[in-house]
Image (tube, helix red, strand yellow):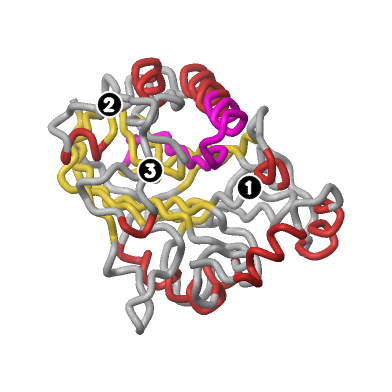
Amino acid sequence: MISHRKKYWRKVLSVSFLPIVCGLYFTKTTHSNTNSISYIEEHTIALEERSEGELSLLTYNVAGLPDFLSAAVNSRASSMKEISKKINRFDIVNVQEDFHYHHELYGEDNRHRYRTEHKMAVPYGDGLNTLSKYPIQETRRIPWQHCNGSDCLAAKGFSFSRITIAKSVNVDVYNIHATARDDKYAATARQKNIEQLVDYINTHSASNAIIVMGDFNAHFAAAWDNLSWFTKQTGLQDVWVMLMKNGKCPLPYPTFVPSEKLTLTDSCESIDKIFFRNSTFIEFYPQRYKVEKQYFTDGNDIPLSDHYAISCILQWKKK
């Protein structure tokens, strides 16, 4: 439960001068271009030629706002250090809300060789980063054209990364953080977020193999969201739908009530999602979907964020 102190500060920070306050408090580096290229090691590993393989994937909203703003109950700095270590077991990791504790996330305990360049904190950053054991060839950051309420106080959007998983085998990886809340104006902004993402995918990844992971703040079961339209327009498939629902999407209905994020099980629909799409050269085979309830906790079994991390295993094979 969020403390009265956190609720008080959230109310204070909802006033019109928040961008100025945030600019003074959070700015640590210079503003970076929205299409900035990712960090790439000077000497990338020599990938072997392979016709098949397996990817372990993770998407995680890490609740990286300062303690007095965060909805997570435990220390954000120590939690981020723990997250930094725990994500090492996954090949490709998308994080959202990586704002104020990025140094801890990218600290010495993290072993991912390739990591996107951080785009500072609120209000200029998008909180999106990708960590990979495979070379990231490039990254672009695209801000949403529509937002609502407090979501307009950060440069939320999505990122595009091209990752090489074997010699001459590339996958386009998207990281998403859509507009939050389910009131009329937020839902309208989120629908437009998804429409913008569809246009970008169909323009820049038209014939490519794709993985899309992130915090969509949306449900198939919510009549006010457009996720079913999203999958039809892009040809993407949801791992949870395939493995936990036998390929059948939940039907949308107007009285849908989302579950609280930390009550989710593998059978519940999460706002944190993993999609994939095959290409004429690569085919994916989802093997496992998991809500990481136990692994991402501290020594007292308290979740390290106000979201659970979502993981999956994708096998891939050249056609």
Residue 47 numbered tag = none
Q: Is residue 167 left or right of residue 148?
A: left
273 versus 56 height, above or below: above
Instruction: Decide: few, some or many residues near mark 3? Use Cα within 10 Å; few <14, some 14-19, many ≥20.
Output: some
Q: Position of residue 192 (x, y in %)?
A: 57, 23
Local secondary structure at mark 2: loop
Q: Position of residue 270 (x, y in %)?
A: 34, 45
Q: Residue at x 84, y 47 (%)?
A: 16
**Residue under numbered circle 3:** 258
**What is the three-letter code of the residue carrying label 2?**
Asn
**What is the three-letter code of the residue carrying label 3?**
Pro
Q: Which residues are magenta?
A: 167-191
Q: Is residue 182 magenta?
A: yes
Query: Sequence-wise, which precedes: disc 3 or disc 2?
Result: 3
Query: Sequence-wise, which precedes: disc 1 or disc 2?
Result: 1
Q: Position of residue 71 (x, y in %)?
A: 54, 63
Q: Is residue 84 magenta?
A: no
- Viewer-nearest residue: 267 or 42: 267
